[in-house]
Amino acid sequence: MTRPSIGVAVIGAGMAGRAHCAGYRTAPTLFDPPLPPIRYVAVVDANEAVAQDAATRYGYDRAGTDWHELLDDDTVDVVSVVVANHLHREVVEALLAAGKHVLCEKPLANSMADAEAMVAAAAAHPGQVTGTGFVYRRQPAVAATKELLAERLGAVSHFNGRYWCDYAASPLTPMSWRYQGGPGTGALADIGSHLIDLSEFLCGPVVSVGGAAFATMVTERAEALGTTYGHARAELSDVVHPVENDDVATFTASFASGAVGTFSASRVAPGLANSLAFDIMAQRGSVRWDMDRPAEFSVLSDLVGDGYDGSRTVLAGPAHPYIRGGLPMDFPGCSYGVSDLFGYQARAFLEQVAGIEGLPPVAPFADGLRDLQIIDAVARSAAAGGATVTLPEHPGH
């Protein structure tokens, strides 16, 4: 049933929060059919100046510092929750109880118990749309890879993935919530959560993990003197705190299909700002993709065994998902970036709210819980010297 209009708010105006703000702005310009009119109601952040800057920059009606004010606001229908992980449950449960549709950033929560409670809260409000922000599913080359595996390449034998970043490589990066929490809540949860989700998105469910190991290279960090968000540097104070979680995480996995996986996540990889990549070996070929070159992927298929078999580089273009109608210049060779993906994600979520059949739906909360189940299993493997840990069945299956 088509809604007359949809009011949007964003809680959290840091790095990812600003991407959500911009994504909702872009969403009505993408694809067909048209969305109902979108009203840009509010941006909320604990820091008033940060909230006001985002509201002004992205054209939202007002800024605020108290997310509770959204609960009784009948002009707000959809809310993105983009705050520290340990705050997700409280905010999401209150929004659902107030009748809002909720898109929550990954990882879904800071603990399994909180994630399970959020899945239960979503189930208790079936008339409201909920989703987890696994935005890299929207990469055109990734979505094309999923189609290739299903239609041409056959059963996967090996997934090899890495997500390497350098945002924590310097000890001058200030202390924040990202460096607090137990083992597995660092690089594994922050960026490895995306890698884990992509592996199941492309290769099916993981049944066990093992060989896990963590390392913390920067063992303490100082508080910033001023306000920071994202991974920004700042002038440091003399107040120092220990880093409580992992800078590096590695592990292996077995999939229900019989495939195996190798995984590596690091937030201390010098010179690699945001380097997500994978290789997939399948029955009739292989795929390689690297987000450092997001608009291309290497494909090996149609093997004939004549000595000339080899991979070819394919440029993402109008024949692949999200390009046609998803970019102002939707022609071959016209690239895209991570910020575009938030527009695709916002468009998909708004389509679900409006009852429009279009893009693939946003990952449900159950997928967010599944991601945390795997993260928890990896942490238990690491604590047990790399022992194999069996996963429960996917909560959404």
Image (cartoon, rainbow, N blue to C red):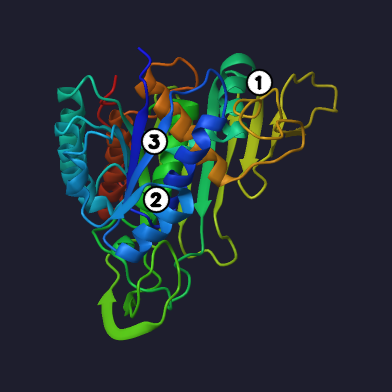
Identify which residue, 342 or 133, lies in the foreground. Answer: 342
Please tell me whether mark 2 or mark 3 is closer to you in this view. 3
Element at label 1: loop
Residue beneath disc 1: 284
| Count of numbered circles on the image | 3
Crowd rating for badge 2 (residues with CA inside 10 Å; few <14, some 14–19, many 20+): many
Q: Residue at x 28, y 81 (%)?
A: 240
Nearer to us of marks 2 and 1 is 2
Q: Position of residue 266 (x, y in %)?
A: 46, 58
Is 283 displayed left or right of 251 in the figure?
right
**3 vs 1, front mark:** 3
Question: Residue 225 placed where, x, y %?
Answer: 33, 80
Depth order, front residue of 225/35? 35
Q: Position of residue 220 (x, y in %)?
A: 32, 76
In the image, what residue occupies the spot 16% across and 30% down? 121
Which residue corresponds to mark 3? 39
Q: Is residue 278 left or right of residue 227?
A: right
Q: Is residue 77 visible?
A: yes
Q: Which residue is denoted by mark 2 in the rendering?
A: 17
Q: Amino acid at mark 2?
A: Gly
